[in-house]
Image: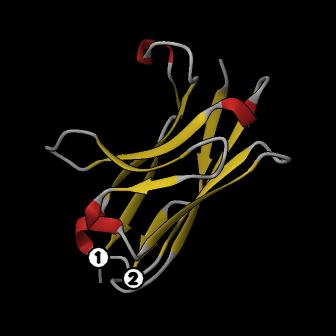
């Protein structure tokens, strides 16, 4: 397993940008499928974006064209660049690491970072 620590959350005005970072410790970061999830108050946690070891990305429809997930395997870090932020993007954002050959119950999660979009 890997240990994950998120950073980069905060308060931003609508239309603004933030970049979240997730630093991973442990072995074999490059083989993990990395993802960002978010959970708004009173709502279920939802998948925002994923990136495979080969760099293939996938996004929930509501963030397509605004968010970009990327990874730097040399730095054991995954990023989420968030542009044109909207109030409905307000949530706690969680980093996730999934080993491609282990069940989802083995996933690693970060502690979460708060993103608040408000004027």
Q: Is residue 81 above or below residue 110?
A: below
Does 23 sit left or right of 14 as displayed?
Answer: right
Which numbered dot is residue 49? none
Residue at 33% over, 72% down: 117
Bin the neighbour count of mark 2 within 10 Å (Cα to Cα): few under 14, some 14-19, many 20 and up: some
At x 74%, y 36%, the residue is 30
The image quadrant that residue 28 belongs to is top right
* Residue under label 2: 84
**Local crowd size for mark 1, using a 10 Å CA cut-off: few (<14), some (14–19), many (≥20):** some
In the displayed structure image, the side of residue 101 where residue 71 appears, left or right: right
* Image coords of residue 89 (percent x, y): 30, 65
Q: Tell me the SS state at disc 2.
A: loop
Circle 1/circle 2 CB separation < 8 Å: yes
Residue 80, quarter of the rendered image: bottom right
In the rendering, which numbered label is found on residue 86? 1
Q: Is residue 58 above or below residue 15?
A: above
């Amino acid at each position: 397993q890997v240990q994950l620590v998120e950073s980069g959350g905060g308060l931003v005005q609508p239309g603004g940008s933030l970049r979240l970072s997730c630093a991973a410790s442990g072995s074999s970061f490059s083989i993990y499928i990395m993802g960002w999830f978010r959970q708004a108050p009173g709502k279920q946690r939802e998948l925002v974006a994923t990136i495979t070891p080969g760099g293939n990305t996938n996004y929930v429809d509501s963030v397509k064209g605004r968010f970009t997930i990327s990874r730097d395997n040399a730095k054991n870090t995954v990023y989420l660049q968030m542009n044109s932020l909207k109030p409905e993007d307000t949530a706690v954002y969680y980093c996730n690491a999934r080993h491609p050959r282990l069940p989802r119950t083995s996933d690693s999660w970060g502690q979460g970072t708060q993103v608040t979009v408000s004027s």
